[in-house]
Image (cartoon, rainbow, N blue to C red):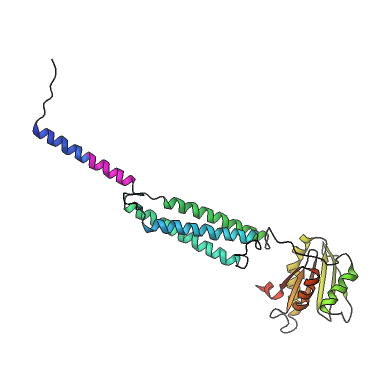
Amino acid sequence: MAHTSTYHVGEYRKSSRRHDRRADRNDGRRDGRRGDYGVNGGSASGAWGKLCAICGLISVAVACAVAARAIAPESVPVIKDLSLDGLLIASGVMIVTTIILIIGARLRAKAFGGRTRSTVWGVFAVVLSLLFSGCGLAVNTMFSDGLVTKPVRDEAPVTDAAAMRKGVESAYGACPGGWTPADASNYPGVKSIELCVGTRTAYATFDSKSVVAMYKAPLQSKALELLETHSGEAAGSDWATLTGTKWVIVGKKQPAQKLQKAWGGTVEDLATVRK
């Protein structure tokens, strides 16, 4: 005998209302899941999410500039004249700004019951920015001139002492009292040190390029100390060093620039050593 189900009118209405409530709840859940990309294409994070993504991209770009400036300072024309300290400060500001926007975007998304993907990219951008900026700072600490540098022309006769003196005198003038050699035996890697009191010029030759990098800064500081004993002579940019692969000359800037055309090397103001 077949069983026949019987529904009363009231029961049918209750069942319909329960079904409608369940449908409403399901629609709400689906809308919540679409919080990041709603029906109208809006994001739960609103403008915070967009700003977070934009600042994150800018932060990564500035951090890449920091790394490039430290590793190969002469390779990128756009950033070679920028200060590394300035780039580091700009990178730090952009990282902090991105973090603030990440927090704001997440709070807004939470308040509207949705989720946002922009903060994920923001966190990723912050991590990349920290890595690139840290890399640039580390490289600059160990290699102040950068890892990749342009080759500098060097035609100085470092193996011929007489030719070296003659070349220096052709730019700085003849030494009135003659050149005075200094004892270089206490300085490993230094081949010779020659001084001229009359023209206030000195030069040193070295065994290798790495030794030049080791002694150049102390030599510049010593030259500044000696020049400062004469009132005002170390001021401004009248004095400079001309540095080659295995030699350094300290003296007036204009003769250094003249000798640079003949021998090559790099001219650097002594006034910048203090900074």
Q: Is residue 185 magenta?
A: no
Q: Identify the residue shown where x is 67% and y is 73%.
A: 272
Q: Identify the residue shown where x is 73% and y is 82%.
A: 233
On the image, the x and y values in percent for residue 152 come to 75, 64
Position of residue 173 relative to residue 155, above or below, is below
On the image, the x and y values in percent for residue 159 come to 88, 64
The magenta stretch is 22-34
On the image, the x and y values in percent for residue 225 come to 74, 76
Q: Is residue 128 among the parts visible in the rendering?
A: yes
Q: Identify the residue shown where x is 30% and y is 46%.
A: 31
| Residue 125 horizontal side relative to residue 214, left or right | left
Magenta region's main secondary structure?
helix
Quarter of the view holding residue 266? bottom right
Most distant residue in the bottom direction? 231
Pick the quarter of the image with the N terminus: top left
Q: Is residue 30 magenta?
A: yes
